[in-house]
Amino acid sequence: MPQTSSQAVTSGDRRVQRTRAALFEAVVRLVSERGTTSIAVTDLADAAGVSRQVVYLQFGDRDALLAAAAMDLTERELYPLFSDLTEATLRSRILSAATFLAHHHRFYRPLVTGSGAFALRIAAGRSFAALHRRASLPVLEALSPATRAAAATFVVGGTMAVIDDWLLAADGEPDPRVLTERLTALSATFTGLSPT
């Protein structure tokens, strides 16, 4: 099974890490420029300065690479915003996340509508599960393990659907305040925090 960005590169090989970083940068750049995920693996590999074989060896296929690049960007830029949440910081951090997503809408919009959308949802679910193990949601803790896993999938899928609707509703760059209002209301339910 292809690795996602949230799975550590176990070899410790800096070349592998540099290759992955170059591929992720190429994916973000080319998808953003072209407005589509229908980009040949050869084009992605060339833009990263690697061979097609490297892409297939490390990711298995284009959709897995697209999902890994999206999750790498999300985990590096968005996840740190949500550590140590308090009622005082919840709304401002959601606004920061929404502003980031709005700024990168040319990348995320094609991902949620392209051929790799399902791979992205799977990767996001796995990534959220790993995040939840580090910083759990109080509402999920009272549930049995099986129900907790299903509820986490529901939360991730629902959050992604809200983000997708917001991304797709605007022709240009979406308004981060709109997403902030939606996610702030929803997050209060799942975090137990009342945003100020």
Image: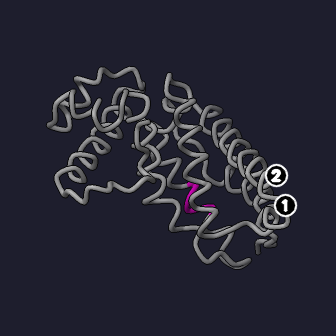
Q: Could you tell whether 13 is left or right of 96 in the image?
A: left
- The residue wearing badge 2 is 147
- State whether the magenta stretch is mostly helix, strand or loop: helix
Where is residue 106 drawn, in percent x and y? 45, 36
Where is residue 180 drawn, in percent x and y? 68, 56
Q: Residue at x 45, y 60 (%)?
A: 77
Q: Nearer the viewer, residue 98 or 136?
A: 136
Seen in the picture, residue 93 relative to 112 is either above or below; the reply is: below
Q: Label 2, label 1: how many angstroms apart (C-alpha)?
A: 6 Å
Magenta-highlighted residues: 94-98
Which type of secondary structure does the marked residue at label 2 adopt? helix
Where is residue 114 drawn, in percent x and y? 51, 24
Q: Could you tell whether 76 is left or right of 154 in the image?
A: left
Q: Amino acid at mark 2?
A: Thr
Query: Disc number at residue 143?
Result: 1
Q: Residue at x 72, y 55 (%)?
A: 183
Seen in the picture, residue 76 relative to 171 is either above or below; the reply is: below
The image quarter containing residue 158 is top right
Q: Amino acid at mark 1?
A: Leu
Is residue 132 on the magenta stretch? Answer: no
Q: Residue at x 47, y 48 (%)?
A: 71
